Amino acid sequence: MNRLTRRQFIHTTGFTLGGLLAGGLHSTGCTTSPEKTLSNLIIQAPASLPSVALARLVHDNAFTGLAESTEFMLWKTPDEMRARITSGQAHISGLPVNVAATLYNKGLPVQLVSVYIWGILYLVTADPAIQSWDDLRGKELLIPFKGDSPDIVTQLLLRHNGIELGRDVDVRYVSAATEAASLLATGDARHAILSEPSATVAFLKAKEAGAPLYRAIDMQASWATATGQPPRLPMAGVVILPDLVETYPEVVERLQTGFKEAVDWVNDDATGAASLGAAYIPSMPEAAMAQSLAHTRLEFTLATESRPEIEFLFNQLAELSPALFGGELPGDDFYYAGE
C-alpha cells in the first residue's frame, strides 16, 4: 500500500516547506479553534501528475488546526479506491467523475466538490500517416482499462465519426496505461489511446529506442468538433462523504481554497510539481511528469459550475450504456454547493 505522510516525506527527502516549495499554500487558518478535529485526514488519488495538487495539501500541512495529521495514499485500481470510500477510510478522493456518479447512484452518498482534470487523452501512433479516426479503419488500437474513461471516450468519438470499435477498428485491451505505453514504445503496438503522463512516458521511451511517436489526435479537441462543446472533458474530480460536511465543515472549506491554490501552483511550476511528485508518486518518472503538464488540461472548477458539462457527457455516455455512470443523472445533492 502506498502511503507517505508529510513527516515521512521531509525525513526521506530532506525537503522543507521553505525549501523546494517556498511560498507554498497560503494559510486559510481559523482565528478560533474548530469544534472537532480529525485524528488523521486521509486523501487518496491515482498515480498521475494532477494528483500532485492533492499531495501538496498534505506536504504543506494545509489542514493545520483541523486535523492532527494528514496522509496521502495512492490508489492503484478502481476497486481499491472504491473500497476505501465505502469503508470510510478515505475522507477525500480524486477519481473519475463517472465513477463518482456510479457510487452515488448505488446508494453511497458521495458529494462531488470540484472537477480538476479536463483533458489528458490522446491517440498516439507510430505511423505519421494516421491523422484522423477514419485512418484507423482495419487497424488494431490498444486501449487501457476496458470500460474506463479512455475506453468509453474513444468509443464515443469513434461513433461520432461513423466508426464502430470492434467492427471497423480492432481493439486490444490492456490492464494499465503504463503497459500500453511500453508496448507502443517497443513497437509491439502501433496505435494506442494514452492518458497523460503515460503518453509522455511512451514518447520518452520511444525516443531512447530511436522509434518516433506522434500525437495524432487530441481527444479533447476531437470532442469539441464532434459535439460543439468546449475542447475539454470533465474527467476527474474530488469527492467527499457528507459526514465530512456535517461534522468537519471547516475541512471542506480549507479543501476548496487550498486545492485551488495547489492546482494553480502545478500549472505554474511544472518543475516543482514534478519534484514533489517524485516523492509522492515514485512509480512515475520525474521527467515525464514535468513534460506532461503541457498536454494536461488541469483546472480547478467548482462542482456546481461543472454540472452542465458533466450532464452533457453523461447523456452522451447513455448512448453506449447508462451503467457507465450508474444509470441516471445524479441529483442535486451530488454536487456540493457549500454551506
Image (cartoon, grey):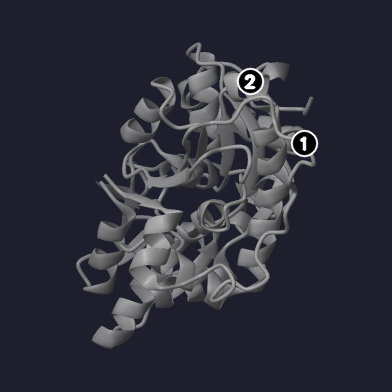
At label 2, which amino acid type do we have? Thr
Nearest to the observer: residue 67 or residue 329: 67
Find disc 1 in the rendering and name its residue.
Answer: 32
For the N terminus, the quadrant is top left
- What residue is rendered at 56% in x and 38% in y? 67
- What residue is rendered at 69% in x and 18% in y? 333
Disc 2 or disc 1, which is closer to the eye?
1
Residues at marks 2 and 1, CA–CA distance in whole angstroms: 16 Å
Task: Name the secondary structure under disc 1.
Answer: loop
Quadrant for residue 90, please give it: top left
Q: Is residue 164 left or right of residue 190?
A: right
Nearest to the observer: residue 239 or residue 242: 242
For the C terminus, the quadrant is top right
**Is the residue 215 above or below the residue 9 in the image?**
below
**Is the residue 284 above or below the residue 173 in the image?**
below
Q: Position of residue 86 (x, y in %)?
A: 41, 21
Is residue 336 visible to the viewer in this orientation of the structure?
A: yes
- For label 1, the crowd category at 10 Å Cα-Cα, with few meaning under 14, some 14 to 19 and many 20 or more, is few
- For label 2, the crowd category at 10 Å Cα-Cα, with few meaning under 14, some 14 to 19 and many 20 or more, is few
Quadrant for residue 293, please give it: bottom right
Find disc 2 in the rendering and name its residue.
Answer: 247
**Is the residue 239 above or below the residue 276 in the image?**
above
- What residue is rendered at 30% in x and 62% in y? 283
Nearest to the observer: residue 61 or residue 338: 61
Q: Position of residue 123 (x, y in %)?
A: 45, 61
Is residue 322 visible to the viewer in this orientation of the structure?
A: no
Q: Position of residue 99 (x, y in %)?
A: 48, 30
In the displayed image of the protein, which residue is found farthest to the top? Answer: 107
